[in-house]
Amino acid sequence: MSDTAAKPATTAEDTLKQKARDGSVVSGGHLVAKALKAEGVDTIFTLCGGHIIDIYDGCLDEGIRIIDVRHEQVAAHAADGYARQTGKLGCVVTTAGPGCTNAVTGIATAFRSESPVLHIGGQSALSQWKMGGLQDLPHVDIMKPITKFASTVMSTERVADMVSMAARECFAGAYGPSYLEIPRDVLDREIPIEKAVLPKPGHYRASVKSIGDPAAIEKLADILVNSERPAILLGQQVWAARGHQEAIALLRGLDIPGYFNGAARGLLPPGDPHHFDRTRSLAFGKADAIIIVGTPFDFRMGYGKRITAPCLVQIDQDYRTVGKNRDVTLGLVGHPGAVLAAVLQAASGRLKNDKRQARREWMKMLSEAEDKATEKLMPLFKSDQSPIHPYRVAWEMNEFLTDDTIYIGDGGDVVTISAQAVRPRSPGHWMDPGALGSLGVGTGFALAAKLAHPQKEVLCYYGDGSFGMTAFDMETADRFKAPYLAVIGNNSAMNQIRYGQMAKYGAQRGNIGNKLGDVEFSKFAHMLGDHGEEVREASQIRPALLRAREAIAKTGRSAVVNIWVDPNEYAPGTKNQTMYK
Ligand SMILES: Cc1ncc(C[n+]2csc(CCOP(=O)(O)OP(=O)(O)O)c2C)c(N)n1
Ligand SMILES: [Mg+2]
């Protein structure tokens, strides 16, 4: 018999607690935790509030880790980041009212990035429904447009059932977030356990590994064995759905050049013969067949309008994305890994030698063009100008990355630039906000990445504007022994916007509303008890990064390297961004 069970009950509360321990009654909060456990959730990201504390009590019983942050935006980004890093449901728990609204940006980011996140929020008691309770808001109405599913839970009996329902919705088609609001009396009430609807782990969801229409698989196999200059773009769904091994097998099996965007960056390491990243326009301009997998024709793809290849195939988890914004030759709906494995099988042994030879030449041509493009960037990458050129920082970071570094970009221009130099070495080692373009994702992503993979190094490259948005949760990373390296490209401005403004309004009027103070962020690190350095010369970037790495290993705390970059240097595309035209 355990110590707790041996203690006699003294108060009514104790009696209830004892009953709960006996397993004869269960509260709504404990049902939440049981359902999360059934879904494989091992960590929740949260900021406390009276409406939700019973969920914490349940998580203690179920052995679910509670990571409490300083701002709900970070909790939501962390839940998203944790989903991206683990391939499982992420979970954020917020209190009613401002707890929910603070998390909106994180959930909206997950929505545009198709990340499976369950957001559970508190609400005033049903007994005070619409009476003007503390922190009362129409949460479900607020969350509906940025989730796949949003609902109130109306009874304690249904709490676990509705958590499972919301989780199922997160994985329907393209993944995404769900929101559940649980009123306080529903959450706190205790009911006999046999009255609760408790879906059985592994029995309330079907496999998502659908291949769609087998006839379309055959058609795509035909296309791929008959083309001479095919190219494949792998998008974030390939990684999110963990279809990357099948995707890589297809590239290698049929000798096709692969391009990678967003979270798919790093699915193949740089230097791999099927990895390409500087010649997408060239390849798409000359290809006779282009296959787009798991990424929409949105602004990042020019809405697909520039593609002129005679054959364009689109594969997506979401039926609504295929053929959206432009016509396609063939559309397939299904799980990217399952579809590509089926296509490879259907094409197996059918690629003729002359076609394979043609592809090798095609890839050789692209590969030479890649080398030329890199050579062209080299003078910028190697620049030793003072103030430091932002391209040099990007290059130094790429040199500094190990095979085990997860790279996160959170900023404007400096991060856009970094994408030209940073080559993640492994799947999941590149994280960016995705289509919402939300600044401030970095701290939550870094916290989540380190918690998901304590043995890996996590480097977040921030703009100084972005860092200011969520940096305080670096303390949370330290508190939970999830240290990471924050590198800041500091130009004392919201520079990406500044350039656009100057291009449109001229140097005088363009400098309004976008300049920031000169902040020595190393002092912020010192305040937290962390290692922090200022870097003002290009030659000092590498030594500072190495010292920071060493400090993190030695102290188990985060580090900040604040690099002062030239505010007058920027990415080539920035000034001409179409949004300013
Ligand atoms: C939350 C949010 N607010 C505003 C923007 C618009 N925005 C895009 S880039 C940028 C500048 C970011 O500044 P910083 O992080 O310092 O990077 P820099 O461009 O200076 O390199 C801004 C404000 C945004 N994308 N997200
Ligand atoms: Mg800046």
Image (cartoon, helix red, strand yellow):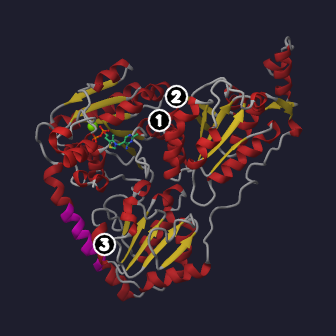
Determine if the magenta segment contains residue 366: yes
Determine if the magenta segment contains residue 144: no
Image quadrant where residue 535 sits? top left
Q: Position of residue 34 (x, y in %)?
A: 74, 38
* Nearest to N terminus: mark 1 or mark 2: 2
SS label for mark 3: helix
Q: Which residue is mark 3?
A: 283
Mark 3 and mark 2 in contact (Cβ < 8 Å)? no
State which mark lies toward you, 1 or 2: 2
* Nearest to N terminus: mark 3 or mark 1: 3
How many neighbours does mark 1 have within 10 angstroms: few (below 14), some (14-19), or many (20 or more)?
many
Q: Is residue 108 left or right of residue 33?
A: left
* Residues rendered magenta in the picture: 361-373
Determine the residue located farthest toward the top in the rendered image.
10
Residue flagged by tag 1: what amino acid is it? Answer: Leu
Q: How many marks?
A: 3
How many neighbours does mark 3 have within 10 angstroms: few (below 14), some (14-19), or many (20 or more)?
many
How many neighbours does mark 2 have within 10 angstroms: few (below 14), some (14-19), or many (20 or more)?
many
Determine the residue located farthest toward the left in the rendered image.
385
Whole-Å distance between the Cαs marked 3 and 1?
37 Å
From the image, which quarter does the C terminus lie in?
A: bottom left
Mark 2 and mark 1 in contact (Cβ < 8 Å)? yes
Q: For the residue with label 3, is its CB less than 8 Å from the closest atom of ligand 1?
A: no
Whole-Å distance between the Cαs marked 2 and 3?
45 Å
Q: Which residue is mark 1?
A: 447
Q: Which residue is mark 2?
A: 69
